[in-house]
Amino acid sequence: MNPSKTQNTIEVENIEVVYKLEEKKIHAVKDASFNVTERKMLGIIGETGSGKSSLIRALNGLIKSPGDVRFNNLKILDEVGTKNEFNFNKLRGKNVGFIPQNPFGSLNPVYKISKQFNFINKRHKIYDVKTLPDKINEALIDVGINDPDRVKNSYSFELSGGMAQRVVIALATFSKPRLLFADEPTTGLDVTVERQLLDNFFDFVKNKSMTLVLVTHDLGIVAQYCDEALVMYKGEIVEKGSVNEIFKNPRDAYTQQLIKASSEDIS
Amino acid sequence: MTVVKLLLNKNNIFVTFSFFILLFFSFGSFFISFPHDPYVTDIANRLLEPNETYIFGTDEVGFDVFSRTIVAGKIDLFISLSGTIVALIIGLPLGLLASEKTRRAERIMKVLDMFQAFPLLVLAIVIVAMWGNNIRNVIFAIILINVPRFTRLIRSEALTVREKRFIEVATAMGGSNSRIIFKHLMPNILGTLLAQASITTAHSIVVVAALSFIGIGVVPPEASWGSMIRAGSQYMTTGQWWTSLFPGLAILVCVLSFNTISQFILRKYESL
Amino acid sequence: MKTLVELNDLSVVFKQPNNVSIHALNGIDLKIFQNETLGLIGESGSGKSTLGKTMLGLNPYGGNINIFNETLNIEDKNLVNNIRKEIGVVFQEPFQSLNPRMKIKNILSEPLIIHNKSITKDEIEIKTQKAMESVLLEKDQLEKYPSQLSGGQQQRIGIARAIINNPKLVILDEPTSSLDLSVRNDVLRLLKNIQNEFGLTYLFISHDIHTIKNISDKTAVMYLGSIMEYGDTNKVISEPKHPYTRALLSSVLSANPDEKREQIKLVGEIPKITSLPKGCLFKTRCPNPSEDCSKGTVERKLKEINEGHFVDQCCASCG
């Protein structure tokens, strides 16, 4: 892969995440740098302790880290932790969307779904109040929810896992962001539900011309849906390339071991 | 051995300090030779400001505030600690039994609810007032107040632990009820228990002081922080601040010490 | 093949405080044969975990459970205890299954002591060391606490504990689901080896098709508390006859970018376990229900369509 440093790349430079636990320092992410081609889908593969969740949180500015993310010459992370973070927050929901792991953790159980859309709409001034209800319905249909009216008027705990995750995706993409981060969006979902959700999700992302960075431990998801991938191990990026390169010709020993384990027949 | 190592660790300086303060108040009176007998009055030298001979000054009847503060510590701490420990010994089996899914457990909780419907502090006052002002009755009052508290706490901790997977495994393996209680439940609630015991002792110190402040329990000539504070309270406005202040500070310092120890226990326990 | 466990028309209903009944198991007929691994596969709400727990006498049930030639009766505490001593259990989250305040050596010796109160210290030492060897762990780990071990090591302890008494049956409920991929296969290999070495029988419960394919001799596919399909694993996986099995298998994402599989989509979502469809449980999701099925007149039962390959009789005709 030849990352072209043109307008069409998102450049991630020197991200580092360190946690302090009592007297110990944990280097969750050690100097991560990579590029994402716009409108492509990048899968970040890693097992537990690889640092992938910390990385994606740092990219979204949820964790402070040195280094930066450059998006069309706009430095996204510059303002995190400063008094200008307010400006970054405007950018965050609007141009950069984030889909976290557990939908029930990210949906507020005391508000109806429609209200949560209202909040986002108000914050980023996306749609006119009159057209809002229709736009909400559209957004829900786009993520594969066939009865948007019922879901709109429900509370999060009334929804199934798959439904809730779809709602979260709809909320995260409501402002039509250009860049979307997803942290293990299908963990805990049943196989059939997960597959249906993913089929729909990746079509959706393609249709809206979004750039996606997805973190997962599931090699299947990356193999089937992503264009590019990178493999993390103990805080470091050990391999990056197109999905074909990585899955068919892995160069790093850890990557090779991982790919082998996923299709291994142990009988 | 590990306890000594922990205390010597420079990060735990506050805990070590707390320990020594408590040791000082508990046992100091046995080792220190006081320049003035804490039980001897000296009207001629009443209400003297702190000076070289009387470090903390004297009170209205000429008692040496310094020696009495320390002697009071011995008594007050003894009452608080022993009351708390006995309450714990009673509350522990009650709490464990109350965490089971049996009718006995429900009965225990009903009795507890009825019991706690009374204002326990008032009940304690009544009991001590009726049965006489002595140390034994104050300890009894402390036990009375704290048994329900411990029972509830232990029950709720035990309930939480019972939900854990390894308890299910122990049952699935054929483990008996007593095995589950002693080998699995208890080790997992011990830390919280000890931490709570420490806090409860701190609370009991204040209760004991409150009781003796209103003249119940340990009364002069026996030394007790509460009664000392009371005796000195009327002189606060006339400028003799030392008579109430020092016993008050002693209470403060001991309560803080127990709280520090409690936090330390919790932190060490949870780090496993 | 000797039958170790036989379940006949097994049903489990949990009554919730607000009078809602959860029908966790609905008329299960199943046999577990000695020295074999039976894989139970299903999604959430399928009842696969409940099945394992019911065999341990952990909840009341309807129907018949015949285990080790005894009929299970949960009122008979002695019987239940004796049966439990012959069953080893391994659960999903290795760390949660181990008492965090117990040293490994005590965790392992516990089943020994429960089984035989008069066991000597020497015997305990020998057996625990042997158990550690069979799961490929060093003896010095015995002095450690669970939090000092990795996930894979913790799970090995769970396995060692389960087999230390040479149980007749080992129930494994999602034993590798929380483990990293690289560790998973090692643990599966280990399980296979000790099964051969000690002649164990496994009931292996999982939602992951790849895992089930790797370890089970026979597979039962569960849906809404009922068995939809049962047979030799390679037959069920390569020639699934039930539409649910087919849909399940088609949903799996291959780690080979060239191998693209179209998902067979099922209609609707899993119905709530509080309100089950009448008759065929699968009819609300079936892409092609027959007339009898929609009317609810077909009785729920497994029909043998090929030798050793069983499918729910309603769906056998629809699929």
Image (cartoon, coloured by chain):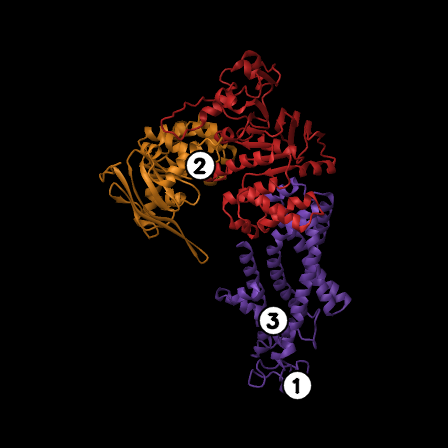
Callout 3: chain: B
What amino acid type is highlighted by mark number 3? Answer: Leu
Q: Residue beneath label 1, please?
A: B43
What amino acid type is highlighted by mark number 1? Answer: Ile
* Residue name at image x 54 percent, y 34 percent: C192
Q: Name the element at disc 2.
A: helix
Q: Residue beneath label 3, please?
A: B23
Looking at the image, is mark 3 or mark 1 nearer the viewer? 3
Q: Name the element at disc 3.
A: helix
Q: Which chain is purple?
A: B
Callout 2: chain: A
Picture colour for chain C: red
Do tag 3 and tag 1 residues touch (Cβ < 8 Å)? no
Residue B155 visible: no
Q: Which chain is orange?
A: A
Do tag 1 and tag 2 residues touch (Cβ < 8 Å)? no
* Residue name at image x 32 percent, y 39 percent: A240
Q: Name the element at disc 1.
A: helix
Pinpoint residue A20: horizontal percent, then vertical percent.
42, 55
Residue A55 visible: yes
- In the rendered structure, the answer to whether residue A19 lies left or right of residue B257 reads left
Do tag 3 and tag 2 residues touch (Cβ < 8 Å)? no
In the image, residue B49 sits, relative to residue B87, either above or below, namely below
Q: Residue beneath label 2, please?
A: A115
Q: Are marks 3 and 1 on the same chain?
A: yes
Q: Are marks 1 and 2 on the same chain?
A: no
Quote the CA–CA distance across marks 3 and 2: 59 Å
Quote the CA–CA distance across marks 1 and 2: 77 Å
Q: Nearer the viewer, residue C17 or A44?
A: A44
